Every structure is written in C-alpha cells, then in structure tokens.
Amino acid sequence: MKYAVIIVAAGSSSRMKGMDKIFSELGGKPVLQHCLEQFVNSKLFSEIIVVVNSARIEKVNAILDSLHYEGLKTVIGGNRRQDSVFQGLDAISICDYVAIHDGARPFVTQELLRSGIQCVRKTGAAIPVLPLQDTIKKIDTQNIVSETMNRNTLHRAQTPQFFQYDLIMEAHQSVDTDVTDDSTMVELMGKPVLAFQGDPDNVKITTQLDLAYLQHILMERNI
C-alpha cells in the first residue's frame, strides 16, 4: 500500500494579528517544520504535498530543502480550503490512501498517524475526534436557547483525516458545497466515516493564545 499526505498551509492567518502562524517559531523552529518532521520521521508516506499560497512558496521550499526528503513538494492552493486540498490531491503521482492535515497543527504524533492508517483500511474514511467537555446549547436567531444538546454524541474533529484516494478524489469532484473539513464531503456522498480517538495536544493554531499554549507544551516535553 502507498500512502501520501497533503499538508494544507495556504490560509491567511487572519486572526494572528499580523503573525504568519506556519512560520511562527516553536522551540527555535517554524510551526510548519515541526508538522512536516512528524510525517517525514514516520516513514509511512511516500509523498508529502504542501499546499501554500504563492507569497509563501519560497519560504516553504526553504524548509522542505532543509529536511532532505525526496517525496516533498509544494503546490499553489486555491481560493477555498477545499480548492487547496483538491490541488494537492491532483499533484499526487500514485497512492492508495491519503492523509489531509492542517499545517498549523504542529504536534501530530506517530501514534495518531498509525491509528489513522489502521482505521482508514476499514471504511475508506477515518478522522480523529475528541469528546466535548462543555454543555452545548443550541441558540435561535433571537439568541434564545432552543435546545440543550446531548454532548455524548458530539465530538470535535481534528486532522489528519484519512481517506482512500479514489473516494476523496470523487468527493472533491462531485461536491461543491462549502465545507470546513474533507470528511463532510464524504458524508454528503452518503459514505461512512469512522471516528477514532484524537489527541488533546494536536491543537490547531488559530490565535496567538494557541501558539502560547503549544509553547508551554513544548517546554514541558523538554523538561
């Protein structure tokens, strides 16, 4: 079996107050480098495709060159996240399964990668999730609570999300609805998506507070 991964790093970092999150430093290395090293070191993926916007490509290529891994390449992304993912899918030469990961999640673990590969073989689509801790309220258009949701059936989705290549390619070719993750496309096709245990430290950097939290995790790991 051949496995590839698409690292999505084409976002605008609009909530980072002028900082570009994928180049922000954690322990002296850019966030994106931490992310890429986990996939390179796993030796599970024959191709690692990094999707970036044109303004970032030179800096990203410099990081890729420093890793000395033959299967790394960059492609230019599209207007929406799903457009960027499709560009990455189209750039893969050959694979049976593909993982799709946010470049702003630097602490993906080897255990999570192995779990995803095991699970995707069962259904063709598998995603890591975490249970919710807070009570969840549904609010109507007048900001009145209309329902208290059963949080035991609700989970937060993470990446990497794992797919049979032909399945996710078909999903991207047939579903044009705006979505926030790739598994939604598979769901819209009526196909099953298997959930497996995610990792609380697999945080996506959205704000500077997220970056500070990951700095704290890194300091604890190095103690």
Image (cartoon, rainbow, N blue to C red):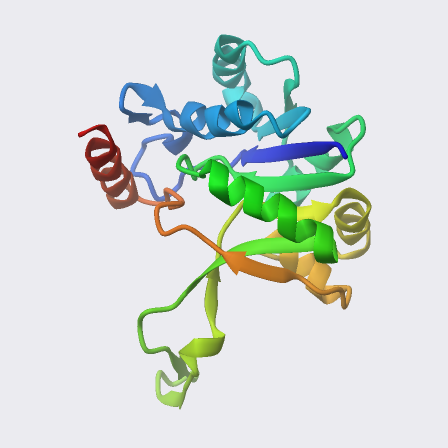
Q: Residue at x 79, y 50 (%)?
A: 167
> Does 107 sit left or right of 127 as displayed?
left
The quadrant holding residue 46 is: top right
| In the displayed structure image, the side of residue 220 where residue 195 appears, left or right | right
Q: Residue furthest left?
A: 223
* Residue 216 in sight from this viewpoint: yes
| 17, 68: nearer the viewer | 68
Q: Residue at x 57, y 61 (%)?
A: 195
On the image, the x and y values in percent for residue 174 come to 81, 55
Residue beneath the point at 72% across and 65% down: 188
- Res. 219 image quadrant: top left
Q: Position of residue 150 (x, y in %)?
A: 43, 83
For the question of whether residue 177 can be seen, the reply is no
Residue 149: x and y in percent read 43, 83
The quadrant of the image that shows the N terminus is top right
Residue toward you, 86 or 122: 122
Q: Quadrant of the C terminus?
A: top left
